[in-house]
């Protein structure tokens, strides 16, 4: 009956594949939104081996917080600098790994 209404108006009947394509597009859009939210929430965290420094970075490796234990006051300045730098780099690597995991999940979702 629906086909007949379309033929009477001169339009072609809807392609049954259009509904499937729209459903896939909606699922992919939802997967993209989920990935965007997950990427915004990514944090990388690292603690120095001696526990003196803890660094948190966002998903792009930008510093979010630096926490130094009281023991830092007994360290020479050069050691503090290298400790913070090394720990920040480890935090950035952690954030990168989290970002890659989110993107890998997105690629898998988009492939469905």
Image (cartoon, helix red, strand yellow):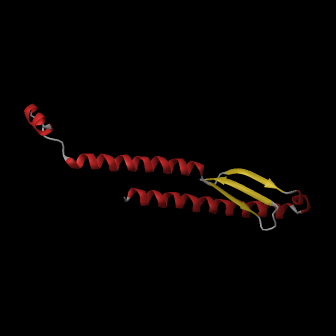
> Is residue 50 placed above or below 2 in the rendered structure?
below
Q: Position of residue 38 (x, y in %)?
A: 54, 51
Q: Most extreme residue toward the front, as rendered?
A: 1
Q: Where is residue 55 in the image (x, y as percent from the top left)?
A: 73, 56
Q: Most extreme residue toward the bottom, as rendered?
A: 49
Tell me what residue is drawn at x 61 percent, y 58 percent.
Answer: 95
Tell me what residue is drawn at x 69 percent, y 58 percent.
Answer: 45
The front one of 63 and 50 is 50
The front one of 41 and 71 is 41
Location of the C terminus by quadrant is: bottom left
Location of the N terminus by quadrant is: top left
> Is residue 78 placed above or below 59 in the rendered structure?
below
Q: In which quarter of the image is residue 98?
A: bottom right
Tell me what residue is drawn at x 68 percent, y 63 percent.
Answer: 90
Tell me what residue is drawn at x 76 percent, y 53 percent.
Answer: 66
How many labels, in total? 0
Q: Where is residue 26 in the image (x, y as percent from the top left)?
A: 37, 46
Left/right placement of residue 14 relative to residue 50 reads left
Q: Position of residue 79 (x, y in %)?
A: 83, 64
Q: Most extreme residue toward the top, as rendered?
A: 9
The front one of 59 and 32 is 32
Left/right placement of residue 46 relative to residue 25 reads right
């Amino acid at each position: 009956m629906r086909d007949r209404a379309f033929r009477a108006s001169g339009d072609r009947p809807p392609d049954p594949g259009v509904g499937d394509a729209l459903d896939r597009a909606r699922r992919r859009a939802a997967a993209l939104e989920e990935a965007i939210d997950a990427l915004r929430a990514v944090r990388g965290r690292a603690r120095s081996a001696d526990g003196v420094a803890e660094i948190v970075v966002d998903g792009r490796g930008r510093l979010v917080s630096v926490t130094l234990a009281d023991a830092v006051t007994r360290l020479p300045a050069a050691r503090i600098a290298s400790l913070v730098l090394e720990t920040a780099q480890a935090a950035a690597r952690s954030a990168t790994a989290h970002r890659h995991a989110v993107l890998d999940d997105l690629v898998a979702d988009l492939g469905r």
